[in-house]
Image: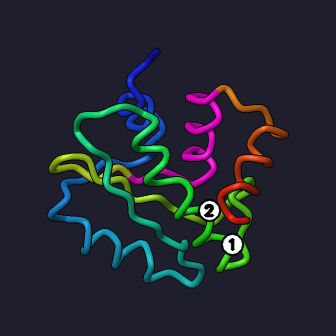
Amino acid sequence: MEDFRHALIAKAHREIPAEAYNRVLGELTATDWPPLVYEVVVPEAGPWESFRDAAYPPLARYLQSRRIDLEDPRGVLISAFLGSRCFLVEAPAFVDLLREMDGLNRSALHFRVLQWVG
């Protein structure tokens, strides 16, 4: 199985030094339609399951509180911090990572999300 960190990095549309994050975030959110930004810390070691269980359920609950469906999170940007780098990943690609790593079809993803927000 591919290490999830490599798969996450491949899905990023932008990589920046972590120390430049606040400046870049300011630029991204200074538009008329700023994205909703959610931050996660990606451990440098450890299994996918630990990261998944720490990152995705809180994300699902947060998005639900904002009336955004995790199954279709357009307009949301994930800032994934890994070491001294930050990878900006569109939320639909972040959800695709979950589907790919866990082998979930749409129905299975739906029931997983229901467990997290229920």
Screen quadrant of the C terminus: bottom right
- What is the count of numbered marks? 2
Residue furthest right in the image: 107
The three-letter code of the residue at mark 1 reads: Gln
Q: Disc 2, disc 1: CB below 8 Å?
A: yes
Q: From this view, report whether residue 30 is shown above or below residue 78.
A: below
Q: Quadrant of residue 114?
A: bottom right
Residue 105 lies, in percent from the top left, at: 78, 32
Q: Secondary structure at mark 2?
A: helix
Q: Main secondary structure of the magenta part?
A: helix
Which residue is nearer to you in this view: 72 or 99? 99
Numbered tag placed on residue 53 in the rendering? none
Mark 2–mark 1 Cα distance, whole angstroms, equals: 6 Å
Q: Which residues are magenta?
A: 88-102
Left or right? Give the position of 30 relative to 21: right
Residue 107 lies, in percent from the top left, at: 84, 40
At a point 37% along the width and 28% down the height, the residue shown is 6
Q: Residue tagged by mark 2?
A: 60
Left or right? Give the position of 46 relative to 35: left
Residue 34 lies, in percent from the top left, at: 53, 77
Left or right? Give the position of 37 relative to 92: left
- Callout 2: 10 Å neighbours few (<14), some, many (20+)? many
At a point 68% along the width and 72% down the height, the residue shown is 64
The three-letter code of the residue at mark 2 reads: Ala
Q: Residue tagged by mark 1?
A: 64
